[in-house]
Image (cartoon, helix red, strand yellow):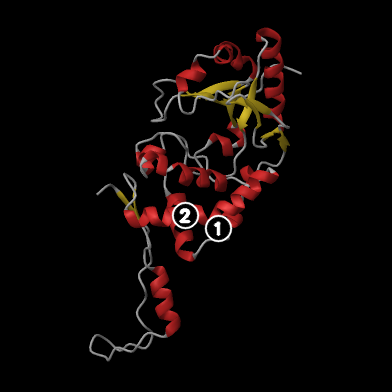
Amino acid sequence: MGVQLHRTTTEPQAVAGSAGPHSARRPLPLAAAVWLLLSCPAWALNVQRLEPAEVETLQSILKAVEPSITAKKHDGTANLLTWQALYEPLTPEQRAFLDEFRALRAATLGATSHYFGETATAPDLVPVGSEQVLKNGVFTPLDPQALPRPVFEAYQKMMAAMQAELGKRLYVESGYRSSAYQLYLFLFYLPKHDHSITETNRFVALPGHSEHGYPPRQAIDFINADGINGEEHPEEFEALPEYRWLQERAKDFGFVISYPRDNPYHTAFEPWHWHYEGPGPPS
């Protein structure tokens, strides 16, 4: 049995009209009974590995939200997913399950990553534009992405310099992501990590902890023209000349690698993940 986190609840107050410990107990009114039932803790998440009932609930949630997520990916708005849209197709029990994840903090999972808080959509997002890369010998469009305007402009300048100096460029596989979409991604990748919240947190940030959803420290996940993003094998991205160029030149444009090798954040090495600190070179 792993470490468990319990929802804090308020104890029900004494029933109005009781006359002491020896008075006859009156049946609870229907409304009070319903309130008592709903106020009970619904989940005690096993962060080491979800219990079978929790796995079943996770699977039901992913199945319920799949149609809306797929539709939003097609129209380019998945990364801007709102809490209302995420919760809409779910039952009260499923929503309570998501609330438990939103209450988690990386520090309780052995990590030291920052908690930025759940933020609203950035006010000045710019679409990155239509991009495609070569995957398995076929040109494949990337999902639509957006970046805060200052980050987008710095990215464009950096790629112009990389193209001029190296004859290559990198593309944006993931830019801004709302906190709601971040939670969806965390749940989506849980099965890949044996349903361990602690282990998944080494690869996917919990909502409120991701640089992808925090414009003052906006992250970009890069992918090269040949479809190499390093997510399955980081050493493949690490071996790219584009990565070596970033190591030497990215700081000149305000970008910094977030999770280098042997980082102190209990986070896996991510050579593709860079965040913007600004301001970069003058216009």
* Residue drawn at x 61%, y 55% as measured from the top left: 85
Residue lying at the far bottom in this picture: please name it. 24
Mark 2: which secondary structure?
helix
Crowd tier of the residue under label 2, counting other residues whose Cα lies within 10 Å: few below 14, some 14–19, many 20 or above: some
User: Can the viewer see residue 276?
Assistant: no
Q: Amino acid at mark 2?
A: Leu
| Residue beneath disc 1 | 87
* Residue drawn at x 41%, y 38% as measured from the top left: 201
Q: Is residue 269 left or right of residue 73?
A: left
Q: Is residue 250 above or below residue 177?
A: above
Residue 200, horizontal then vertical, whole percent: 41, 39
Q: Amino acid at mark 1?
A: Tyr
Residue lying at the far right in this picture: please name it. 283
Residue lying at the far front in this picture: please name it. 137
| Residue beneath disc 2 | 98
Mark 1: which secondary structure?
helix
Tell whether label 2 touches label 1 (CB within 8 Å).
Answer: yes
Residue 120, horizontal then vertical, whole percent: 62, 46
